[in-house]
Each structure stands twice: as structure tokens, then as C-alpha cells.
Image: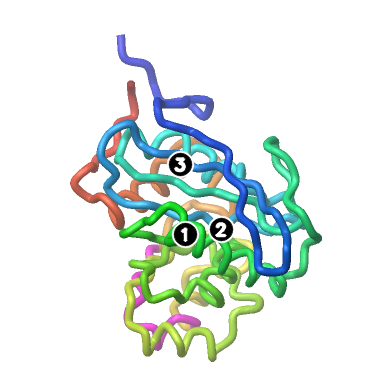
Amino acid sequence: MPELIRPSTVLPANRSAITIKTSDGLNLIGELTTPLSEITGSLLMLHPNPSGGGMMDSHIYKKAANRLPAMAGIQIIRFNTRGTVSEAGKSDGEYDHGKGEKLDVLAALDYCFEQLKIKDLYVIGWSFGTELALQYARDKRIKELILLSPPMLSTTQDDLDFWIKDGRVITALIPELDDYLKPEAAKLKFSKVKNLKQIDVTGAKHLWVGEPMVHLVLSEIVKVIAPSRLPLPQEI
């Protein structure tokens, strides 16, 4: 009998611990999750703010790694930015309010392209991770950005101007009940970023709690990277 997908569901994939080395000498811990079959695309995940408990295991990211390799053929790369701790351990260094984390993002991108030899890389940021994505994930080899609950606290107009000129597609999921940036404010903030697709999510909050919200977010990720693999199953 089929069973419902649950928060604890872990589907088959190859999972391995990785270490990303930064240019200032730090070791960042992470995990690479690769499909058992053909890879449809690869996704580098930038997690929420560690000062509020964010880490590579923040629930949407953990569930993406547990499900999307098997469901959609997506390879997942997660890591803890400097000073961030998760079940796998703690990355070297100390939290630097999004400044020193630039080196973490650049090191993770270098790892993806130079070590893993990824061809089709997408980058997703959630909350604090969206600031890192918009400010530092600018490598021309990145296909697209996905933003979950962007607070837009440190990202400047100059940062947005870069993306306006760059033209690559950005998909932004904006919770109706977000703590920082609600849909109407987001429309104003992103009004000049014509390459940004804003998806307003009724009833959603900043942390996307609950299985219906998880399914929605994962479906939007797959719509960007591997749309032929939709709809995602809700039973196994």
C-alpha cells in the first residue's frame, strides 16, 4: 500500500559528507546528495540566518535533500556557513553578519564548478540566504536564482541593479504573512527587476511550516529545474 510522504520521509539517494575550504582558511561542513539515476540539475542551498537557528538542515532544505534527488533527479549541495552548527557538526569560524560569508558562497560555488564539475547549477537562498545569493552568487555559470522569503535587509539597490542588467531569471516566493517582506512591499521593492518572477503564497509564513507548504515550495523548485518531473508525488 502507498504511504503518505511525511516530514521524516527519506528517499533513496547517494549521500556523502563534504568539506568546502574557503580562501581565508576555514573548513565548512556540508552534504552532497546525488540521485541514483540521471541528474536533471544541481541546486546549491544557502541557509537562513544562523543567529536565529538557520543551518543546512533547516527543514525545507533537509526535506529537499531527502526527497528531490529521487523525485526529480535534482542533486542537492548543502553546507553550513562559517560558525554555523547542525547535526553534522560546526563549520570553522564565526558568524559575520553576511560579510565574511561572501567567501563561503564563493568557495561553495568553486567547489560546485571545479570539484564536482557541475554544468547546470541553480542557487536557492532562504531568508538570510537570499541576501547571500543576491549579493554574492553572481558567477556567470549559475543558471538561475530561487529566493524563499527574502527579507531584503542588507541587499542594496546596487545589488538589484546588477541583476537588472544581468537578466538571468530569478524566482521569488513571497509569503502572504511574512515577518519582513510581504507581497505588496515585495512588488515595490522588485518593481524594476523585470527578470524576477514573484510568486505570492496565500497563508504562508516566513518559515514555510507544514507539509502543504513544503510540498508547494519543493514543487516550485522543481518547476524551475526539472518541470517535466511534476507533479511531485504525495505518496510513495
Separation of residues labelled 3 and 1 (CA atoms): 11 Å
> Can you identify the residue that label 2 sits on?
46
Dot 1 or dot 2, earlier in sequence: 2
Residue 14, position as x, y percentages in the image? 43, 31
Mark number displayed over residue 4: none
Q: CA distance from mark 1 to mark 2?
A: 6 Å
Q: Which residues are magenta?
A: 189-199
Q: Residue at x 49, y 42 (%)?
A: 32
- Rendered location of residue 13, percent (x, y): 40, 30
- Residue 183 versus residue 108: which sits nearer the camera? 108
In the rendered image, the vertical position of residue 41 relative to residue 170, given as above or below? above
Residue at the extreme top: 1
Amino acid carrying label 1: it is Ile
Q: Compared to 27, does 12 lie above or below?
A: above
Mark 1 touches mark 2? (CB < 8 Å): yes
Q: Quadrant of the N terminus?
A: top left
